[in-house]
Image (cartoon, rainbow, N blue to C red):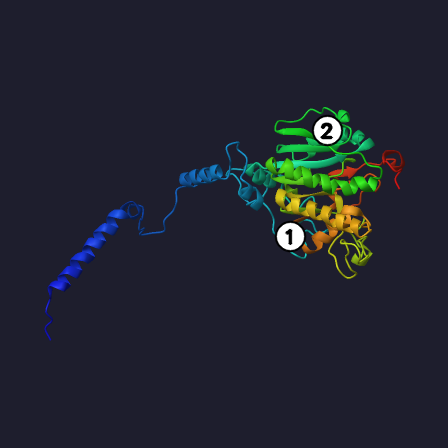
Amino acid sequence: MQRNITKSHVLIVVVFFIILVFVYGYFRESFTSIRFCSQVCVVPEKDLFDLENKLDEIDRNEDGQCQKSSCKTGEMIMESGLKYAQPSTLTGRSDVNAVTNWNVPLVWEGTFDPVVIDAIYKRINPRIAVVVFAVGKYTRFLQKFIETGEKYFLVGFNLTYYVHTDRENEVPKVPLAKGRKVTVVSVPSANRWQDVVLGRMKWATSTIETTIRKEADYLFMMDIDSVFHARFGAESLSRLSAVLHRGYYKTTPRDSFPYERRPESKAFIPAGEGDYYYTAAVWGGYLEDMYKLVKYCYEMSEVDTKNKIEAVWQEESHLNRYLLTNKPAKVLSPEYLWSDYDKVTPDIKVVRISQLVKNYEEVRPNGGH
């Protein structure tokens, strides 16, 4: 059957071609960038380097600091050309466990390459905050803490020591490397050492909100009565990093951990639950995650106070309760907080920081009780 071509058909065809011409003209620039390869398309190495540099510029602000999103993700990107030992899939530490049961690193000496891990984190150039409290006679520990920190603690990174004290005139003037400084924060005195411990969470929360949030990407909480002895580097950085307490990391069953066992406390952990026992003398992580944790410890302590109860180990008890359900992204071995009171065991290949022997009766405001 013969079909008749009407004027309507012709008009439809003309309109269709006009639309095609319009679309091509509008998107012409996009079409010119499309190439069809007869073989696998390969981006030249020079272009890859240029792309890396452009991405690096996007991840930094005007001061050369990493944007918060970049610092938080901690993407494992490293500059090309770095020389380091080839990693092995067959050898490593065989005397300790190097991974948790939720599959995150448990960091020991010999489980990382310091050249590689520092190169990765120095590329994003994070700003580190260290919050310490030197109330009353504890100002005597500031000198050694900062001096040894300058020698071993995140060397080569931008870092600020936020010293909270009631004796501002006793904060020592310690020579600091480029990009590192001390900021003094005034806090009230206390009549009990327990009040100093509990007060740390309150004042740390306040300092984060008013100051640190604008100045740092990562935050560490540390006890001032400690001294660094060896490298404490970028392998410690993560969303949340908790340190195994030296007294309970080997064979102690979890029902014997010194968790808060009274249901009346917000720090309560019942028998049969728990992973590890973490110390509150060193802990760290990405700023906003640390803020949530510090504020949690403060608020839960306040609830306990209203209920006329004090957690058995103050903020350490609340820290362990929080980390039971909010798992840390890295667990650091007791290398990251040992004690001069204890003999170093064979599995501790290096003591990175250690708590000092002291006379608690003399340095604590209520005589150690």
Rate crowding at label 1 as few (under 14), some (14 to 19) or many (20 or more) other CA atoms within 10 Å. some
Residue indicated by mark 2: 147
Q: Position of residue 24 (x, y in %)?
A: 25, 50
| Residue 253, picture quadrant | bottom right
Q: Residue at x 65, y 36 (%)?
A: 129
Quadrant for the C terminus, please. top right
Q: Position of residue 340 (x, y in %)?
A: 82, 38
Q: Where's the N terminus, which quadrant?
A: bottom left
- Callout 1: SS: loop
Task: Tell me residue 204's x, y (percent).
Answer: 70, 39
Q: How many marks?
A: 2
Snapshot quadrant of residue 51: top left
Residue 8 marker:
none
What's under tag 2, amino acid-wise? Glu
Residue 104's mark? 1
In the image, 18: left or right of 217? left
- The part of the image, by quadrant, that contains residue 139 is top right
Q: Which callout, 1 or 2, points at the residue further toward the start of the chain?
A: 1
Q: Nearer the viewer, residue 45 or 167?
A: 167
Look at 67% across and 26% down and name the residue there: 176
Left or right relative to 334: residue 11: left
Say few, some or many: other residues with alpha carbon within 10 Å of mark 2 (under 14 / 14 to 19 / 20 or more). Answer: some
Nearer-the-camera pick, 56 or 316: 316
- Residue 349 visible within the image: no
Three-letter code for the amino acid on which mark 1 is drawn: Val
Where disc 2 sits, the SS reads: helix
Q: Position of residue 8 (x, y in %)?
A: 14, 63
Quote the CA–CA distance across marks 1 and 2.
Answer: 32 Å
In this view, 295 is above or below 184: below
Choose between 97 and 362: the one closer to the eye.
362
State the residue at coordinates (13%, 61%). 10
